[in-house]
Amino acid sequence: CPRRSPATTSRPGRAPPCPALPRCPRPCPASSSPAACFSFVLPSITVVTWNVGTAMPPNDVTSLLHLNTGETNDVDMIAIGLQEVNSKINKRLKDALFTDQWSELFMDVLSPFHFILVSTVRMQGVILLVFAKYYHLPFLQDIQTDCTRTGLGGYWGNKGGVSVRLSIFGHMVCFLNCHLPAHLEKAEQRKEDFATILHMQQFEGPVANGILDHDLVFWFGDLNFRIESLDICFVKYAIDSNVLSQLWEKDQLNIAKSTWPVLRGFQEGPLNFPPTFKFDVGTNKYDSSAKKRKPAWTDRILWKIKPTSKGLGTGGHRPSHGVLSVSQLCYCSHMEYTVSDHKPVAAIFAVQFASKVDKPLVEIYVADEWSRPEQAVVRYKMAVGFHRSSWDWIGLYRVGFRHPKDYVSYVWARSDDGERCLEKQLVSGLQVMFSEEALPKGNGEYILGYYSNTSNSIAGVTEPFQISLPRSEEGSSSTDSSGSSSEEDDSTLVLLAPKSRSPSPGKMKRHRSRSPSLAKFQGLILRPSSRDRGTSRSPSPQSRRSLPRNIPTIHLPQEHHGVKSKELGQAAESSEGSLFYQTVQEQGGLRHVTADSSLARADPRNLGLLPALRLEMIDQALGWRRESADQGYYPCQRMSPTRLAGCGTSPKEGHSP
């Protein structure tokens, strides 16, 4: 919460100042990395909950996340729970193509502070995001998510809970974001729904299968508990008079913690901030509508530590070794945000872990600077017992990256088969090298990360290092090769695969396409005109070196009477009504790209073809692929790490990415 003086007036929004976060009790060794210091400090976790009421994100959330206050430098993880994110059909279709606006906002704001999105889960309007500093990523393992619907008897996800569980330095921690039923008289329904969520959510693995089996549980969200017995006039009087303690004993959640067995062991800090519901949108005034809803603390953050007195935790599993203690350093609302009828609530926790895991699963060694392509050599060693996969890869990230798939380039991790190489891997490690084409040009700071496909997480990272490579003059000129038939592949735009969160390094360089209109047309080939290549906003054609094999020809409908583009009409007349895209053929190992008409050589953006594409075209393309797959034309090939889904077999050795 913002640093401010203690409350001395009756105006809502005043809260005691947040204390400074604890510092390192003893200095870290000079040679230690930030992660090495982690075992000596009290790591801190920030938890935020906000019912956004289907509103658009605000322009600034720095105060909500405690940024630019000196506190975030000591925060290791941030968990953000949102409720009532706009989930109408048009918004859900848009969010299915690329990230929703709220997640984009938090990633954009947190990435400059070296926070990386570890995991996210969404159930209609309920979203949970978990961020961590990049140097903690190798110690965050066994990441799993789950969700439970409780609306309309369990068939609708407007109410329910979403969770992210993970192992933090060997301790199992679960973040649970819930949106429970509303209204004063629904207290018993809230109890039943919470019990249902705890019962339904189960995780894989030998330990911590249920939510309460975890060493530490953070439970937060719009829990919708209200204030009983007191009328609205007295509640507002207590708020204006800053005597909030008179409302605590009538708070339904405070009552339930002492009477409901399902809430036994859950703790919460004092409610020293005004009730966070319900406000007139755009103001700090409580509900002035005809309903005049009574103010209430609906938005809450609680935690629970698994008891270890008997030596065995819930479910018969032995708890994690070492001391685990939690202290709440801050618990406050943020009155400065008025886009919703709820005020967001934030809490900062100091969690003391006696770390069991002091070394990453994969150690990566790299030079301090890459000034020549031949220096782009990466050595890495894997810990004993690490379950590697032939789909593992090493990503090159620019400092300030947003999530594990936000890489600049990548290389497949070398996979030597057989036990004969085990000793070599443990002693001397393995070695891979980035190709010159995959390296970013210019100067900048970068990080290498080993991504484990088995655990869907980064198992090892390096400290930031420098890349200083001269910029290629050939790549700066986009029209030099426009007339060369030997480089026709370079002038071809291959659209991104569906659900690709970041572009494949083999397909583009440093450019993230945010266009939702191109994502679903996998295999469609458009050929831009040479005069427009220099200003194209699509992925750079110059970064293509080869086309994917077996790309189908897609024939657009010959009838285009509904298209109102002048250019399209002119091109259609010149082609006598036959409208085709270019065809890729293979003869004798060589691939030829032919244009069936002058329209195929025109820029599709100028012709207005993309808005004219019909849904039946997708059916034709997918039907062609299904028939080809049945005949064996589409073998499973090793491609970009962002396109591994749907390929069930491991690649053969020697296949290139």
Image (spheres, helix red, strand yellow):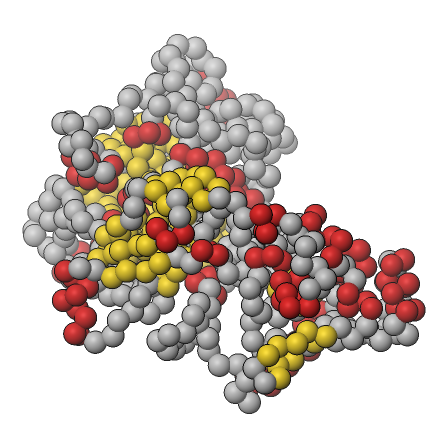
In the foreground, 50 or 419: 419
In the foreground, 285 or 612: 612
* Count of numbered badges drawn on the protein: 0
Q: Is residue 302 above or below residue 235?
A: below
Residue placed furthest toward the bottom = 631
Residue placed furthest toward the top = 8
Left or right side of 600 for 319: left
Q: Residue at x 73, y 57 (%)?
A: 530
Give the x, y percent position of residue 437.
48, 56
In the foreground, 139 or 263: 139
Does residue 276 appear in the picture of this structure? no
Quadrant into which the N terminus falls: top left
Left or right side of 314 for 544: right
Quadrant into which the C terminus falls: bottom left
Q: Residue at x 37, y 40 (%)?
A: 466
Q: Residue at x 68, y 74 (%)?
A: 593
In the foreground, 596 or 457: 596
Give the x, y percent position of residue 326.
21, 36
Give the x, y percent position of residue 566.
90, 58
Does residue 581 appear in the picture of this structure? yes
Q: Is residue 84 above or below residue 13?
A: below
Q: Is residue 289 above or below residue 152?
A: above
Give the x, y percent position of residue 450.
32, 55
Q: Residue at x 29, y 46 (%)?
A: 367
The image quarter in which residue 582 lies: bottom right
